[in-house]
Amino acid sequence: MRSPRSSELREALRGFSGELRENVSLSSATHLRLGGPAERFVEPQTDEDLVAVYRVCRDLDVPVRVLGGGSNLLIADRGVSGMVISTRALNRVDIHRNRISAGPGVTLPSLLRHARERGLAGLEPLVGIPAMVGGAVAMNAGTRDGETFDRLASVTVVEPSGEVRVLARQECRPGYRDGGLGERVVLEVTFDLQEDSPAAIHARFLRSLERRNATQPVTEKSIGCVFRNPPGRSAGQLIDAAGCKGMSHGAMTVSDVHANFFINQGGGKSADFLSLVDDVRSRVQVHAGVELQPEFRMWGF
Ligand code: EPU
């Protein structure tokens, strides 16, 4: 693959918003606080500029990765080559009647606050998930109470070809913790909600949050659930039963609160996280005969 000189890329991106930077640390952009730098990094300020940057990278054969909230992401210690495009600045929210549209950089807590204030119900299952809208759709983030696609009406995406398309819900094939969008980049999402009183919505938020706070290590540096739940089983329960709670590799520890959460106690390495994942996986395999599948995305491995 051709690696364009910085000056060539810089020239091609001239005039677009969001300064092109090199060797940019990514660890603080992930919830685990792990991982090395991005070779190139840009944070477009408009949808049009995101699309333009995406197309330029495509034309110059620069691999592109899109960074959202970094909550379900493990980045290699040595970092990632190519371009990382942050969607953080694309955070507008529009509400028309019972429909709410959000850019990929809107955080779920902010989306839920807008919905509650406008008396729009339906997003309650997503309360407490520390994601941005783009990542939540890409991963079909959810809980036992529901998933991101449950209320999704349409999603605007950039196709790998660079073309922008609006996909209706019926055109999407989301699965468990997978939005089924492949390489497409989320540009905007519209949710279809129903009216209810803000007080009733708030009460449901609080109930879910209380449950979550009691069963998950929500204030720690983690990646959320490490493994998918195997059909009809709970990964947390399987890891717990295999005696893995409290196990550690370097600064990475299996949470005592919920065994499917691995915590960075500080100063950890991505390599330690992965070796803990492998160790836990093989112990569960031996103990229960179940092969757990990781739920998070990996960059640079
Ligand atoms: N359990 C244990 N030990 C543990 C953890 C759990 O025995 O260390 C038991 C619990 O007692 C319970 C069962 O396992 O009987 C299930 O646990 P929990 O209710 O906490 O739910 P979960 O299946 O572990 C799922 C989602 C979470 C979501 C919660 C709440 C997955 C992989 N996990 O967890 O999603 O927040 O339900 O709705 O689907 C995520 O995907 O990142 C995530 C955190």
Image: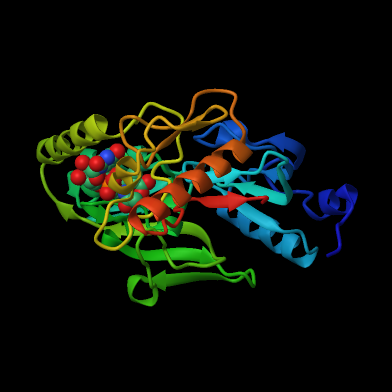
Residue 115 visible here: no
Point out the residue furthest to the front here: 286
Image coordinates for residue 266, horizontal then vertical, percent: 54, 23
**Is residue 233 rendered to the left or right of residue 136?**
left
Image coordinates for residue 200, horizontal then vertical, percent: 10, 39
Please tell me which residue is depicted at 41% across the width and 27% down the height of the picture: 220
Residue 288 visible here: yes
Image coordinates for residue 275, horizontal then vertical, percent: 57, 42
Ligand 1, seen in the image, is in the quarter at top left
Measured along the vertical axis of the image, is residue 154 above or below residue 220? Answer: below
**Is residue 136 rendered to the left or right of residue 85?**
left
User: In which quadrant is the N terminus drawn?
Assistant: bottom right
Q: Quadrant of residue 218?
A: top left
Q: Which one is in front, 131 or 45? A: 131
Image coordinates for residue 47, horizontal then vertical, percent: 56, 54
Measured along the vertical axis of the image, is residue 71 above or below residue 53? Answer: above
Measured along the vertical axis of the image, is residue 60 above or below residue 163? Answer: above
Could you tell me how many numbered marks the image carries? 0
